[in-house]
Amino acid sequence: MTRYFESAEQITNGEWLSRPRRNLPPTEAMRRALKELDLNIVEMSDENATLDGGDVLFTGREFFVGLSKRTNQKGAEILADVFKDYAVSTVPVTDGLHLKSFCSMGGPGLIVIGSSEPAQKALKIMQQMSDHRYNKLTVPDDIAANTIYMNLPSKGHVLLHCTPEEFPESAKVFEKLKDHMLIPVSNMEKVKVDGALTCCSVLINKKAKV
């Protein structure tokens, strides 16, 4: 049975907020690991609130929260209450599993977005909701828009993205990012069970105590 970590988490500025649509085994393991990193853990106690990490897009400036089958308005409101220093805007997800099924952050101020009508409609809503003007990188395949961006001290801008074997046209678009170290990562097996690259990742901007 496949388990995805992203669905159980939202980590920003040392806060961990969790309440997925259903209880997931990774949650307890995540809790133990994050305690070791001295992160503050916030539990969503409202039984009617749901928040899936795949519906939460943090741009570095603000949050966009997809309202989907896995995330509801109450979950978005609790996230806004926890992260008071950031604007939180909701985006209806009418097609696809969740918000990051067709978008992600590809770098500072850069939104990678799919080309489908639902993806473009969501992007338009985000642009209307935000006071900041984001750059965009549009790829032909929605699932290829799900990427993992990291700014690593020794490497600079690093982007994990789909492989040319999976989505050749989308892979060509990523080559436009000349300032990025591009690392193709296969998602061929995970996609069979609705998985994407971010589903298997938890990014924490904190040095571990070794």
Image: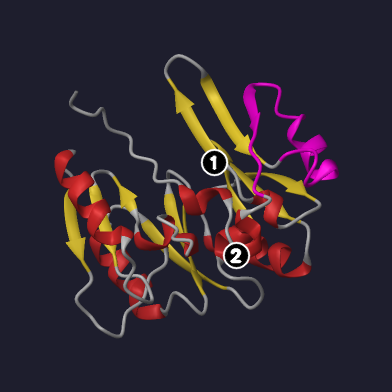
Indicate the position of residue 97 as horizontal and vertical percent values: 59, 70
Label whose residue precedes the other's in the sequence (2 or 1): 1
Indicate the position of residue 40 as horizontal and vertical percent values: 16, 50
Is residue 109 visible in the rendered structure shown here?
no
Q: Residue at x 56, y 64 (%)?
A: 99
Disc assigned to residue 148: 1
Disc assigned to residue 179: none
- Tell me the amino acid under the disc marked 2: Val
Q: How many marks?
A: 2
* Residue furthest out toward the front: 1
Q: Residue at x 46, y 75 (%)?
A: 70
* Residue furthest out toward the bottom: 48
Q: Using the rendered view, name the quadrant where residue 72 is placed.
A: bottom left
Segment tinted magenta in the rendering = 163-187
Could you tell whether 150 is left or right of 94 in the image?
left
* Residue furthest out toward the right: 169
Q: Secondary structure at mark 1?
A: strand
Name the image colouring.
Answer: secondary structure
Q: Residue at x 71, y 70 (%)?
A: 118
Instruction: Based on the picture, tell me whether residue 173 belongs to the magenta stretch.
Output: yes
Indicate the position of residue 56 as horizontal and vertical percent values: 45, 60
Instruction: Based on the picture, tell me whether residue 46 belongs to the magenta stretch.
Output: no
Q: Using the rendered view, name the quadrant where residue 122 is placed.
A: bottom right
Is residue 100 visible in the rendered structure shown here?
yes
Q: Secondary structure at mark 2?
A: helix
Look at mark 2 in the image and give the residue it sits on. Answer: 193
